[in-house]
Amino acid sequence: MVIWLPRSLNVIAQCYRSMLSLNVIAQYYGAIALQSDDSPSRRPSS
């Protein structure tokens, strides 16, 4: 029990950290996609 508690806290911390990094990456690529898709989607050439 004494060993299991810190291990679970470590897993929760890792999950939280990975979620934060994934959120940052998603926002980063989302901004790039919005910037690249802005002109063609608003003004379709075809």
Image: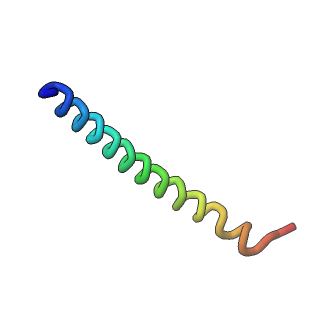
Q: Residue furthest left?
A: 2
The colouring scheme, among rainbow, by chain, secondary structure or one colour, is rainbow
Q: Nearer the viewer, residue 28 or 21?
A: 21
Residue 13 vertical position relative to residue 6 in the rendered view, above or below = below
Q: Nearer the viewer, residue 21 or 1?
A: 1
Q: Residue furthest front?
A: 1
Q: Residue furthest bottom?
A: 43
Residue 10: image location, x then y, percent: 23, 35
Residue 25: image location, x then y, percent: 45, 49
Q: Is residue 32 left or right of residue 1?
A: right
Q: Quadrant of the N terminus?
A: top left
Q: Is residue 16 left or right of residue 2?
A: right
Q: Is residue 28 left or right of residue 2?
A: right
Residue 4: image location, x then y, percent: 20, 27
Q: What residue is at 15 percent from the left and 25 percent from the top?
A: 3
| Number of numbered labels in the structure image | 0
Q: Quadrant of the C terminus?
A: bottom right
**Location of residue 40 (image quadrant):** bottom right
Residue 43 vertical position relative to residue 37 in the rendered view, above or below = below
Residue 8 vertical position relative to residue 35 in the rendered view, above or below = above
Q: What residue is at 59 percent from the left and 58 percent from the top?
A: 33
Q: Is residue 1 left or right of residue 37?
A: left
Q: What residue is at 18 percent from the left and 33 percent from the top?
A: 5
